Image (cartoon, rainbow, N blue to C red):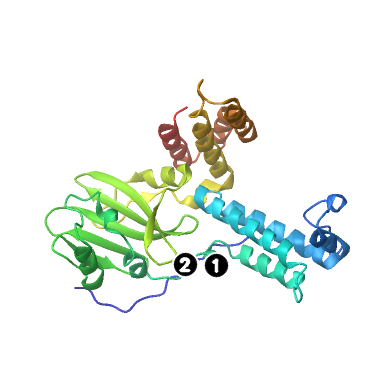
Amino acid sequence: MIARALLTLSLMVGTAPAVIRSAAAGPSFDCAKAGKPVEKAICADPALAALDADVAAAYGRAADRVAIDAGAATRLREAQRAFIAERNKAFSMPGYDLGRHLADQKHLLEGWPASGTPMAHADVMDWVKGLPREAFDATTAGVETEAAAKALVTTGENDEFRITRLDARRAVVASKHNGDKVHLTLKALPEPTLEAHTRNMQVTTFTYWAPRPDGRLERRHPAIAVQAANEIFVSGNGDDLVVGVPLAEIGPELARHLAAREACRHWSGEVGDDLPPARLKEIEAAVKKLGCERLPAEEARLRKAAASKPNIVAVLDRAKELLGD
């Protein structure tokens, strides 16, 4: 049984320096094409125009930070679209403060994704308590019942496993009967995520888990960039975790390239003679927008730029294994 006081973990994601703008700067859209009342109001007020541009700039920086994770990028886009829809709807309502709404959205985006994740400051055990039994499926024995799962996270052990290491960021769960171990680590990918790294008879697997609104964790399937970075590793010693490629080294340009390759593979996998013309047209438009034909040349350029960075070359190699040519 392991007892200790809960520690506080803050997974902070750095933000880019604020963009200095003049009050005369225009908004993020073309005022000549402004049609909605809220857009016309922004164009008519230099201060609101500057705030609107700042929101767009903050969104762009946040998009760069989450580009490495396709799921996180989707959640950011959805949040921004929801803000725009709310702005447009609320503008005509009595008491609505457009300037305050824009300033609040700018602040939210500057802290994204940490401020957008309910468990960003949680202790690792707060996460583990919501972990489903399926997270241990890669072990030899697994966790067969809810009672066994509850015992593990409340007392530190059950009939099969014992928590042998615990701090604010990481827990190590070891089998009582063989060499199986599960390393549970809080990571920013870029959103806070619990990585379950299972070592079972010389086989290593990674799964990723993130909270639902009710606090239970659900399986996440990170982008190829995240998978490739975490699956390129060198062996550690004893209880030391394997050393993965730091995700920060990948950077937004490579992340976008890998995301485009993943998307191109998805769309190309749908091509077939039995598809209706409308669907074929949709696929053709998506492939064109992604620039799939340019990706081989882009990969060659990225490989050349990373010639002195074996970790990045390894990520490109692993992505190629996962996605194919």
Q: Residue 177, can we see it? A: yes
At x 55% / y 32%, what residue is drawn? 299
Point out residue 223 in the picture as x, y percentages from the top left corner. 47, 45
**Marks 1 & 2, CB-CB < 8 Å contact:** yes
174 lies left or right of 72: left
Quadrant showing the N terminus: bottom left
The kind of secondary structure element at disc 2 is loop
229 lies left or right of 70? left
Residue at the outermost bottom position = 5
Up-down relation of residue 307 to residue 198 (above or below): above
Residue 20, horizontal then vertical, whole percent:
76, 63
Q: Which residue is mark 1?
A: 115
Local packing at callout 2 (Cα closer than 10 Å; few below 14, some 14-19, many 20+) is: some
User: Could you tell me residue 85's position as x and y percent?
Assistant: 68, 59
Q: Nearer the viewer, residue 239 or 188?
A: 188
Which of the two residues, 265 or 181, is positioned nearer the viewer here? Answer: 265
Pick whichever of labels 1 and 2 is earlier in the sequence: 1
Front residue of 184 and 317: 184
How many marks on residues? 2
Task: State the residue lying farthest toward the front.
Answer: 276
Q: Secondary structure at mark 1?
A: helix
The circle on residue 120 is 2
Residue 108: quadrant of the picture? bottom right
Crowdedness of circle 1 by 10 Å Cα count: few (<14), some, many (20+)?
Answer: some
The amino acid type, in three-letter code, at marker 2 is: Ala
What's the residue type where badge 1 is placed? Ser
Against 300, residue 101 (above or below) is below
Cα separation between marks 1 and 2: 7 Å
Residue 146 x, y percent position in the rendering: 23, 63
Q: Nearer the viewer, residue 212 or 245?
A: 212
Q: Is residue 112 left or right of residue 219?
A: right
Task: Identify the residue at image location x=72%, y=67%.
Answer: 90
